[in-house]
Amino acid sequence: MAPGLVSCQCDQGVCECQTDVFKPERERIVRFLIEEKGYRPEEIKLLVPLTVEIPGKRLHTKADIVVELEGRPAICIRLHEGSVVSRERGTIAAARLLNPEAPPPICVQTNGQEYSILDTYTKKSLGERLEDLPSREEMLKILREKPPRPLSPKQIEAEQKILFFYDGIG
């Protein structure tokens, strides 16, 4: 059996399924958010499912960590192997689709070692380290000062295609 794979039961009998290779990184990021940035454990959601539908196809993907403040997503963090920069656009799409009525203002793409912190609306870089994330108090201020920017139906369709490309094909 290949490294990182475990034997599990599937509809067709026994098969190989990937283990959760990013669990340690997720746990480390959550600890950092709580201990260093002041977020509360109940404000942090893990493995938030996202379903993308484009004509004739459906993709089930996820946001690894979502920080919610005052009932609104504030930060979306996604973990993927490989180049962080090459996956930024897919992470922006995922963040925007988390809540098309009020996307989180900040999203993060990481491979567990490198980080790209981005403004979800403008796509501009906000930093390259976890330390560059706003504290809970700073994030509350950002949410108050930046009203949500709802996506139009056309924007939702475009973001779904982008996320499908990054997570379903790329």
Image (tube, rainbow, N blue to C red):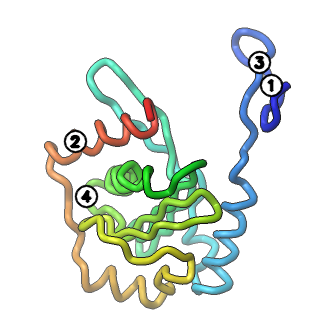
Distance of label 2 from label 3 (alpha carbons): 35 Å
Q: Which of marks 4 and 1 precedes in the sequence?
A: 1
The residue at 49%/80% (across/down) is 133
Q: Classify residue 111 by image quadrant.
A: bottom right
Q: Secondary structure at mark 2?
A: helix
Asked if 79 appears above or below 72 in the picture, the reply is above
Dot 4 and dot 2 residues touching (CB under 8 Å): no
Q: Which residue is mark 1?
A: 8
What amino acid does circle 3 point to?
Cys
Give yes or no for contact between labels 1 and 2 (Cβ–Cβ under 8 Å).
Answer: no
Dot 4 or dot 2, earlier in sequence = 4
Horizontal relation, residue 133 to residue 28: left or right: left
* Quarter occupied by the C terminus: top left
Q: Which residue shows up at 70% across the image and 74% down it?
A: 31
Q: Give x and y (percent) for residue 27.
A: 71, 64
Say which residue appears at 71% left-offset and 9% top-offset.
Answer: 12
**The disc label shown at residue 15, or none:** 3
Camera-side residue: 126 or 6? 126
* Local SS, label 3: strand
Whole-number angstrom distance, CA of label 3 to CA of label 4? 40 Å
Q: CA distance from mark 1 to mark 4?
A: 38 Å
Q: Is residue 71 above or below residue 49?
A: below
What residue is pinned by disc 4? 101
Disc 1 to disc 3: CB gap under 8 Å: yes
